[in-house]
Amino acid sequence: MKLMKLSLFVLGLATCFFSCDKDDDDDSTTIVIRDRTEQQVEDKALLLDYLETHYYNASKFDSSNPDPKSEDIVITELNDGDVVPVGHKLLIDDVITKDVNYADTDYEIYYLDLNRNVDPNAPSPHFCDNVVTNYEGFTLDNEVFDRSTNGAFNTDLLSLITAWQKVIPEFHTAETFNENADGTSNYVNHGVGVMFVPSGLAYYSTGSTSIPAYTCIAFTFDLLQMFENDHDGDGVPSYLEDINGDGQFTLNSAVDVFDGDDTDGNGVIDAYDTDDDGDGVLTIYEDIDGDGDPTNDIGKNGIPKYLDPEETEANYDVDKI
């Protein structure tokens, strides 16, 4: 990634799911870092070819199915001379395309939204929240490299590859759920999808024993629950600390340039900075009206006090600090 706008994508490249760690025992191969724009052209062509030559059991996910699940989807290659069976559709006919700018590169990511009956009023996570999912990851040659086991998987989206941070917020969590005596839960009417991911939003130049560098991948998933994160415990939900509103956390591009998510320019993004404006007063103490939400304390200049370095401790009632 270019140094002018350093994103937190290192977390996504390094950690996504446990089985996708880089193979530290193989030091014999040197991976050449490719140009992201050129690689995206290749990846897009591969993904479109896959979407145009594979179909899925679409009728299983029509509105008559009240509670579909990701385990129900079956994706099949369309061989030369064959026709798409009744009740099935080519992936290309149903995928949604989302344009994403990441690491100074324009990407297209493709996904299927498969639950036609999901409650639109159910919560959707932000890119930096915790989510509970079931999932299965596979390559375009249908090799499964990872799946959730022993029940649903609860994790911070920031610890996953970038694609998850971009796609999962487009889905809704379960309408209801019931806890079973054995500690498991039954989720009803939740988001169900498949994402088809270019390497630049996945593991790019890193890899593992099961995922070579520059590999396009896919995931089926159920979005079950979400939990809003406040990573630095400052009373401001992390998603509100995406100051420039680009759906990712980035540092400022240069000294004295405030175009990222670091209000005071101290090299720490606000989502992990307990004193966002660098005024010497912890953000959590800049909730002057005491309602538990520092974002509501707007100064006369229209800036929330936790982001305004002019709002120093001397301006406060010391009994409230």
Image (spheres, helix red, strand yellow):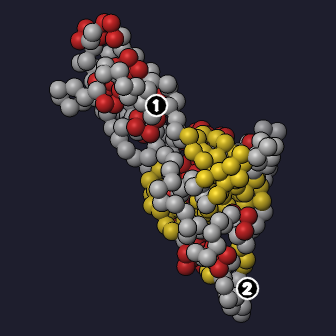
Identify the residue shown where x is 82% and y is 39%.
25
Report which quarter residue 117 is drawn in.
Answer: bottom right
Identify the residue shown where x is 33% and y is 38%.
259
* Residue 71 higher or lower than 234, as above or below: below
Q: Residues within 10 Å of mark 1 (few under 14, many from 20)?
A: many
Whether residue 38 appears in this view of the structure is no
Q: Residue 197, position in %: x, y?
A: 60, 60
* Residue 36 higher or lower than 291, as above or below: below
N-terminal-most mark, 2 or 1 = 2
Identify the residue shown where x is 47% and y is 56%.
121
Question: In the rendered image, which residue does mark 1 sit on?
Answer: 271
* Residue 91 higher or lower than 223, as above or below: below
Q: Residue 48, position in %: x, y?
A: 58, 73
Q: Nearer the viewer, mark 2 or mark 1?
A: 1
Instruction: Tell me which amino acid carries mark 1.
Output: Ala
Q: Please tell me the numbered disc located at residue 8.
A: none
Whether residue 174 appears in this view of the structure is yes
Camera-nearest residue between 219 and 256 = 219
From the viewer's perspective, tell me whether residue 201 is left or right of residue 285. Answer: right
From the viewer's perspective, tell me whether residue 102 is left or right of residue 310. Answer: right
Identify the residue shown where x is 76% and y is 46%.
180
| Total residue callouts | 2
- Which quarter of the figure is the C terminus placed in? top left
Q: Residues within 10 Å of mark 2 (few under 14, many from 20)?
A: few
Q: Residue 315, position in %: x, y?
A: 23, 12
Q: Please tell me the numbered disc located at residue 79.
A: 2
